[in-house]
Image (cartoon, helix red, strand yellow):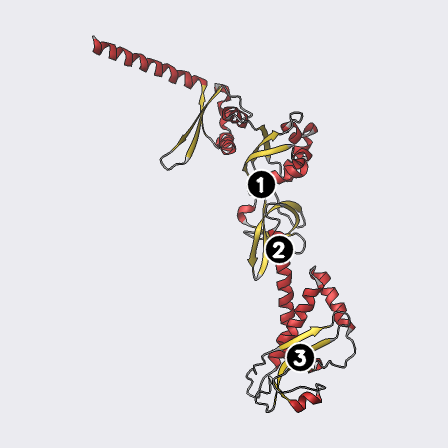
Amino acid sequence: MPRKKNEEEPKDTIIGLVKLLAEERDIDEEEVFQAIESGLVAAYRREFRDNDNKEVVIKNVNAEIDRETGEIYVYKLAEVVDDVVDEANEISIEKANELGYEDVEAGDMIEVAIDVDDLGRLAAGAAKNAINQKLRDAESAKIEREFSGKIGEITSGTIVRKDARNVYVNIGRAEAVVKHDGQIRNNRNEHYDQDRIMKFLVMGVEEANGRPSVVLSRTDAKLVTKLFELEVPEIKAGDVVIRSVAREAGSRTKIAVYSKDPDIDAKGSCVGQRGQRVQQIMNELAEEKIDIVDWKEDPALFISEALQPAKVSRVDTEITTNENGEVERYAKVIVPDQQFSLAIGKSGQNVRLAARLTGFKIDIKKESDESVEASKALIDDFKVVDDEAGKEE
């Protein structure tokens, strides 16, 4: 398509502006160029109005910026016609010739340059708004792409401020928020003070006030898993595997680990020399207690491990399928009388976490109670036998 370019001096300043904006927003320079071009188009569409202040419909307005010189070229596509009816979208052959287009005929489409210096105050405002919106969109898209790929991963951030419900965190370019359910509120050592650096789990990306907001959590059980992956080389290498985690955030976590290598002690690897590794994680979690147990394939042995620090005498398990086709796992656990309170835990926390860790409903009984029940059952059996014998006589 024939083009008559503006005979203007290169605008080197636009190149500097693009580089500055791209660096500040951490987005590609090409996206900034495209944003400015879109803004100029929006400005000229706004500027083209008739005497009654009604917008004149211009079918095709475009803007281009030379990526090397910074020269701005704004133009509309006009159809060459014998008699002009629509001045906004048509041009006569004579006028086209005057603009330097030769050998054109009716039906041709040519680019008609628009003087950039004619950009009025209102148009400049429209261009600025369009450019800012485009840059926000580009920045938002980049943030969403980046953090959508980091869901379930750890990120570090600095506390900016907090209000009645949310904690706002600086994690670099993106705005991040820790909602009420992602905050540890039952631990006096957990503080969301301004400028404090903490680790968080990325939960997702949501839109807030027209911009993407990264949702973080300090309460999700996967945060503990990821902290162990960072702290324990054997887990990162895949030699030690975390099989399950049960957590009551801010209070206590139970984690079951298994070693693929018989020469590696899974539990010892996670605890670390003199407990340094697990202590480092506890420090990050505001001194939340962490019980590390060995995962066992045998459910009874696993349940015994999960109930630590309590000692277990016996575990009877039963796995059934209910009328809805759902698998139900039940375990009756017998413990020495003096271990009963320890097995249950404060407010039932130990047995509750053990149940979640193993996937079994756990019923804990004292040895003395079990003996009484066993004796009673034995007596009942004798009574049944005696009754049946009496009937036979």
Q: Amino acid at mark 1?
A: Lys
Q: Amino acid at mark 2?
A: Arg
Residue 168 seen from this side: no
User: Mark 1 or mark 2, which has the lower sequence index?
Assistant: 2
Give coordinates of residue 38: x percent, y percent: 64, 71
> Which quarter of the picture shows residue 11?
bottom right
Give coordinates of residue 259: x percent, y percent: 62, 29
Which residue is under mark 2?
A: 145
Q: Name the residue at 67% across, 79% down.
A: 75
**Residue at disc 2, secondary structure:** helix
**299 left or right of 392?**
right
User: Mark 3 or mark 1, which has the lower sequence index?
Assistant: 3
Task: Give the residue at the far top of this rendering.
Answer: 393
Q: Residues within 10 Å of mark 1 (few under 14, many from 20)?
A: some
**17 left or right of 213?**
right
**Residue at disc 1, secondary structure:** helix
Which residue is under mark 1?
A: 222
Q: Name the residue at 71% across, 61% down.
A: 24
Q: Amino acid at mark 3?
A: Tyr
Which residue is under mark 3?
A: 75
Query: Height in image: 124 above or below 33?
Result: below
Q: Which mark lies nearer to you, 3 or 1?
A: 3
Give coordinates of residue 160: x percent, y percent: 64, 53
Structural distance between the alpha carbons of marks 1 and 2: 22 Å
**Residue at disc 3, secondary structure:** strand
**Which is more toward the observer, 5 or 55?**
5
* Quadrant placement of the N terminus: bottom right
Q: Which mark lies nearer to you, 2 or 3?
A: 3
